[in-house]
Image: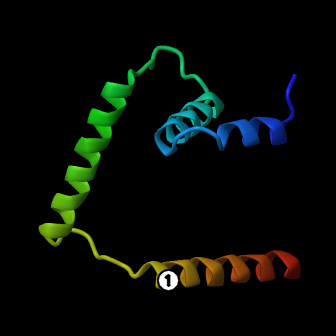
Amino acid sequence: MPTVDELFEQAMKLTPAEREELADRLYESTLPEVPGEEVSPEEAQAAWAEEIQRRSDEVHDGQVELVDAFEAIEQIRRELWEKRQRERQG
């Protein structure tokens, strides 16, 4: 059986589109199967398109507050640090 490094070298010889397809298939292979919820790639893509539209509508309708990504990451880091400090104090 080839090693991960050997497989990677082989994969790098593929076109970008082939590597993207391979990455998608490998990622999909790591997801747990949910009995009774088999979804075709087309159904999954349609569901994501609906979700993206819903989120876009919420933004345009002013239903959600947008947060700068860097600020959100900083807030999460701060909250995580504070949580760890509380856990250490007992």
| Circle 1 crowding by C-alpha within 10 Å: few under 14, some 14–19, many from 20 | few
Element type where label 1 sits in the image: helix
| Residue at image mark 1 | 70
> In the displayed image of the protein, which residue is found farthest to the top?
36
User: Quadrant of the image for the N terminus?
Assistant: top right
Residue type beneath disc 1: Phe
Q: Where does residue 44 sit, x and y in percent of width and height?
A: 36, 31
Residue nearest the viewer, comparing 50 with 41: 41
Residue nearest the viewer, comparing 13 with 49: 13
Residue nearest the viewer, comparing 75 with 3: 3
Q: Where does residue 61 sit, x and y in percent of width and height?
A: 12, 67
Residue nearest the viewer, comparing 51 with 4: 4
Left/right of residue 2 with respect to residue 63 in the rendered view: right
Which corner quadrant of the image does residue 4 belong to? top right
Instruction: Tell me the residue at 40%/82% (across/down).
Output: 68
Left/right of residue 78 with respect to residue 8 in the rendered view: left
Left/right of residue 82 with respect to residue 26 in the rendered view: right
Which corner quadrant of the image does residue 12 belong to? top right
Q: Is residue 8 above or below residue 76?
A: above
How many marks are shown on the rendered structure?
1
Left/right of residue 76 with respect to residue 39 in the rendered view: right
> In the displayed image of the protein, which residue is found farthest to the left?
61
Instruction: Tell me the residue at 32%/26% (across/down).
Output: 42
Instruction: Tell me the residue at 28%/47% (across/down).
Output: 51
